[in-house]
């Protein structure tokens, strides 16, 4: 883990000069699962954001022995959505264990992680997650990224007769022979050690029910300590899987900072999120932030009124998570036309952890499916560096498919300040498809659903939005669920 304050120093340095510590390779790894097609989708932000047409994409298929099956290269030079089913390029698909995805350019790419969405397309589900692990570019990056070894967490836990919890452990450029450590905290804490011996550039699904036999539903904090790996940055893909159909909904883990003392010199962090009417809306916060005691509450916004929820206290480290059902709070508030809520965390000692993370849960309110969209997000703090004259830019993927309900919500991270004009460009595989403009109030979100996508006659594919604002705190979240089953997945904007 790289300390957050070090991340901030690098951001400040990078905004001062574009030719210091330049990046010319940006990469990710995509695991292949037998029950799904492996897809990557991205808007050519290299060109649209920075005017860079000098991009080469290399896709390498890697077999179970950690060796190359084959590779293919593609020029990325058009202002459009690139949606690529990785299996189409290769023979003997059953031998492929994962894909190494690399973007190269002679110009500065700025970020070693590309803004790419990984889609696993299966029967009755499409799982969506942004790029989350990669082979590092050099030993100097390794020095910075792997400075501290910590547990990974923010893993939603469910074990019953129909569902299990799994996580996907990936190896880097070297073979691994070591141990994984798991801790599972309910009323007490249980620990497990899992011997691992895997080839380089491989991955393996590990199922929690193999170690923990009792049923659990959102009452536990799961942590995974991965073995140290040179030249590799790896979060774990983790989520819930239907035991019968093998459909899954998974997202990336996040650092457990409960043993790392790192704070801002103030007492409050917050962030606003879209509220989706007639959908599932929840917040889960795990006790994985720097040692602290935080009072957390929710604010719900109506036309001219604000409703404040009861406060819940989360102690970190501890065995107790907190959960807010936003739908229940909206009903209790009595407010109408709600499209925004805000999460607020406060400390009593003028020191708040730099990383206050939680899960943003969306899904089908009426479905029996427990495969919800669980998106890992962080609260915003006033101490986070904001470049002078920075404007808002948020972009991401939305699924348009007749078998799925999709939602997109766009709002400001902080609902103080003035309204602003939001311009949104929607792109598909042929390029720019539709441009719209709306004035957005800070207490509202712009909500787009299937009715909008049908009215505009979008093609059935992964489309991307590019939203712009004069306000720097623009962001978005999108999710979708399979209409017959309710199986859901989603992501936040880049």
Image: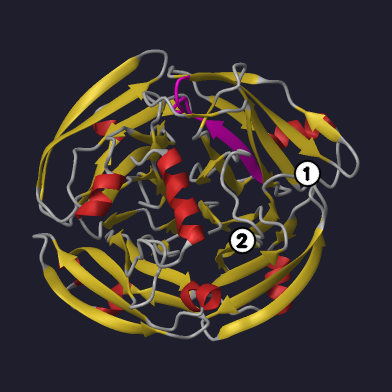
Residue at image location 43% in from the left, 36% down from the top: 154
Q: Which residue is mark 1?
A: 416
| Magenta span | 279-291
The Cα atoms of the two marked residues, 1 and 2, are separated by: 28 Å
Residue 351 horizontal/vertical position (percent): 56, 23
Q: Residue extending furthest top?
A: 188
Examine the rendered structure and indicate whether residue 185 appears above or below residue 164.
above
Query: Where on the picture, by quarter, is residue 446?
Result: bottom right
In-front residue for pair 129/348: 348
The answer to if 283 sits in the magenta stretch is yes
Q: Which mark is residue 32?
A: none
In-front residue for pair 347/124: 347
- The 10 Å Cα crowd at callout 2, few under 14, some 14 to 19, many 20 or more, is many
Residue 323 in the figure: left or right of residue 419: left
Viewer-nearest of labels 1 and 2? 1
- Total marks placed: 2
Note whether residue 168 is visible: no
- The 10 Å Cα crowd at callout 1, few under 14, some 14 to 19, many 20 or more, is few
Label 2 SS: strand
Note whether residue 136 is visible: yes
Label 1 SS: loop
Residue at image location 64% in from the left, 43% down from the top: 280
Residue at image location 44% in from the left, 56% down from the top: 129
The answer to if 434 sits in the magenta stretch is no
Residue 315 in the figure: left or right of residue 6: right
Report the quarter where the N terminus lies: top left
Residue 12 horizontal/vertical position (percent): 49, 52
Examine the rendered structure and indicate whether residue 254 appears above or below residue 24.
above
Residue at image location 44% in from the left, 83% down from the top: 53
Q: Which residue is mark 2?
A: 406
Residue 118 horizontal/vertical position (percent): 40, 62
């Amino acid at each position: 883990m790289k300390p957050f304050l070090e991340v901030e120093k690098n951001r400040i340095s990078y905004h001062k000069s574009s030719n210091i510590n330049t990046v010319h390779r940006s990469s990710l790894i995509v695991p292949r699962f037998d029950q799904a097609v492996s897809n990557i989708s991205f808007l050519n932000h290299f060109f649209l954001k920075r005017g860079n047409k000098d991009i080469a994409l290399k896709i390498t298929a890697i077999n179970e022995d950690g060796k190359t099956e084959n590779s293919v290269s593609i020029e990325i030079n058009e202002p459009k959505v690139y949606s690529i089913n990785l299996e189409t390029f290769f023979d003997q698909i059953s031998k492929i264990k994962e894909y190494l995805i690399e973007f190269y350019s002679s110009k500065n790419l700025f970020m070693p992680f590309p803004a790419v969405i990984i889609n696993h397309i299966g029967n009755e589900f499409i799982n969506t997650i942004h790029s989350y692990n990669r082979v590092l570019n050099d030993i100097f990056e390794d020095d910075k990224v792997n400075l501290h070894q910590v547990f990974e967490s923010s893993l939603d836990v469910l074990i019953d007769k129909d569902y299990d919890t799994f996580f996907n452990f990936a190896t880097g450029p070297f073979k691994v022979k070591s141990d994984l450590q798991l801790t599972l905290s309910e009323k007490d804490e249980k620990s497990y050690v899992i011997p691992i011996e895997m080839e380089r550039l491989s991955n393996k699904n590990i199922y929690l029910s193999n170690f923990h036999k009792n049923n659990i539903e959102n009452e536990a904090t799961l942590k995974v300590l991965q073995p140290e790996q040179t030249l590799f940055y790896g979060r774990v893909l983790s989520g819930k899987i239907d035991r019968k159909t093998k459909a899954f909904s998974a997202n990336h883990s996040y650092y457990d900072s409960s043993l790392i003392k790192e704070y801002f010199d103030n007492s409050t962090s917050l962030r606003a999120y879209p509220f989706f009417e007639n959908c599932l809306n929840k917040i889960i916060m795990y006790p994985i932030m720097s040692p602290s005691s935080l009072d957390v509450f929710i604010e719900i916004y109506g036309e001219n009124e604000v409703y404040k929820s009861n406060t819940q206290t989360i102690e970190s480290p501890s065995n107790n998570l907190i959960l807010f059902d936003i739908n229940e709070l909206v009903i209790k508030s009595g407010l109408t036309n709600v499209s925004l809520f805000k999460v607020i965390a406060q400390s009593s000692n003028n020191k708040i952890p730099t990383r206050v993370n939680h899960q943003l849960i969306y899904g089908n309110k009426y479905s029996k499916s427990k495969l919800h969209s669980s998106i890992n997000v962080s609260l915003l703090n006033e101490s986070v560096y904001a470049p002078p004259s920075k404007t808002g830019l948020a972009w991401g993927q939305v699924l348009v498919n007749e078998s799925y309900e999709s939602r997109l919500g766009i709002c400001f991270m902080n609902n103080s300040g003035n309204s602003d004009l939001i311009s949104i460009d929607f792109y598909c595989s042929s390029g720019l498809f539709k441009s719209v403009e709306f004035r957005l109030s800070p207490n509202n979100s712009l909500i787009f659903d299937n009715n909008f996508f049908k009215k505009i006659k979008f093609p059935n594919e992964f489309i991307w939005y590019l939203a712009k604002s004069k306000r720097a705190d623009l962001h978005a979240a999108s999710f979708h669920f399979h209409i017959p089953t309710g199986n859901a997945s989603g992501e936040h904007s880049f």
